Amino acid sequence: MRPRPRKSADPREIELKFYLPPGSRTALEASPALASLESRQHHLVTTYFDTPDHLLDRAGLTLRVRRSGNTHTQTVKARAADRGLATDRTEWEWRIGQNKPDISLLAKTRVLAKAATAVKDRLEPVFVTDVQRTTRLLRLDDGTVVEAAIDAGNIEAGPVREPVSELELELKSGCIGPVYRLAAGLQVVAPFWISTESKAARGWHLRTGQTEGGRFGQMPKLERFMPAAAGFRELLGGTLGHLVANIGATLRGDPEALHQMRIAIRESRAVLQLFERHLAAAPAERFAAGLRRLGEIFGEARDWDVLCLETLSAAKADLPFERLEELNLVAEVARQFAHAALADALREHDFTALVLGLAIWAEGGMAQPSTLGDDRMSERLGTLAPSLLDRAAGKARQRGRHVGRLSVTKRHALRKSLKKLCFDVE
């Protein structure tokens, strides 16, 4: 999504983050996009700070001091908004002369003034990252400038450590669309998969043994006078942001995060169905098919979660202990197989290619609506929206005819139509 103009002067960090599996770095650096560019090496040792009761983390803030050579940089980041495929968050930075935070700098920033008072004299180091970073600067279409950073190293929380192997594409200036296209091109030559989980979130997991948990979707910011293509981009960007925000916690086994990813897939499909009459048929059908296949994999894993974590627990009073134990064992084995298939799907080329393809398509439709669909995608959203909602309501009404005589399968189809209609109206 194109960066939205903001009233606030607070600096932003907008980036795409990808996990690099073993062996992919060599192919990545040999790619035509990176091979001819000058690279710079940095040894970064970063210490994250918080209070004993995790006050900053609970407030959605991360405070760190990074040492690179003899230079120390203090950074505060706000939690990302999850409104698009790229991570977009507020970031404040100061050059300091020590390896511990200077709280007085926070007090000079309006947004951080209260935090400065609350954490004064209470901060302690909570975890450390030690990485070798290789950076390259790329100049893309439309004057877009991107820093490509490859990180290799470790996250350490006391005696526990976890390896870091990442590619970060940070937007320095311009539009995010060319960054999506760059990532899609790099993925053709080097295997990697998208994940928005920050080093800070991974560090907290190492320190506490707990994940961030499921992240809920956020309402899109729509305006009646924006072009319909812009509304489509906002809606689809929101569902994709909701999807990728839950990857890390899902891979760590969090049931709610998996549930939120399944919701995000269903809502992405609902966006395509809402606009389908005005979208280019070939890409719309291809993306819908990819989301449908993904939804089937997530649906199976979610069904086993519900059976193992909810249904069988509720059946304690109705089944003999021995029978319940037997069912629990069989169901848990099936659940683990379903989760393994889900993890494989998230790490495969097709998943990242799908979400990047959707983002590229939606973003490209802003500059050239004809690549997205018909002439009505250039109309104001407020003009087109009533006909979109009338069509969605008509589908639900058609499926609800003679509801008392519907089979179980058709009642289920009606329920799904009503859920999509609720999402469309919201």
Image (cartoon, rainbow, N blue to C red):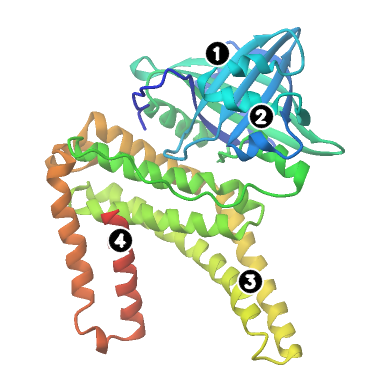
Task: Identify the residue at image location x=48%, y=58%.
Answer: 262
Q: Residue flagged by tag 4: what amino acid is it?
A: Cys
Residue 154 vertical placement versus 382 (above, below): above
Tell me the CA gap for discs 1 and 3. Answer: 51 Å
Residue 270 vertical placement versus 362 (above, below): below
Quarter of the image holding residue 41?
top right
Q: Residue flagged by tag 1: what amino acid is it?
A: Leu
Say if mark 1 contacts mark 3, CB within 8 Å: no
Between discs 3 and 2, the one toward the N terminus: 2
Residue in the foreground of this view, choosing between 29 and 407: 407
Say if mark 2 contacts mark 4, CB within 8 Å: no
Question: Mark 2 — residue?
Answer: 118
Q: Residue flagged by tag 2: what amino acid is it?
A: Ala
Q: Quadrant of the N terminus?
A: top left
Helix, strand, or loop for circle 4?
helix
Discs 1/2, front: 2
Task: Identify the residue at image location x=25%, y=54%.
Answer: 274
User: Badge 3: few (under 14), some or many (20 or more) residues near its Cα, within 10 Å?
Assistant: some
Kindly identify which numbered label has been placed on residue 309. Answer: 3
Left or right: 277 as drawn, with respect to 219: left
Question: Mark 4 — residue?
Answer: 422
Q: Residue flagged by tag 3: what amino acid is it?
A: Leu
Task: Identify the residue at image location x=43%, y=45%.
Answer: 240
Kindly identify which numbered label has been placed on residue 37. Answer: 1
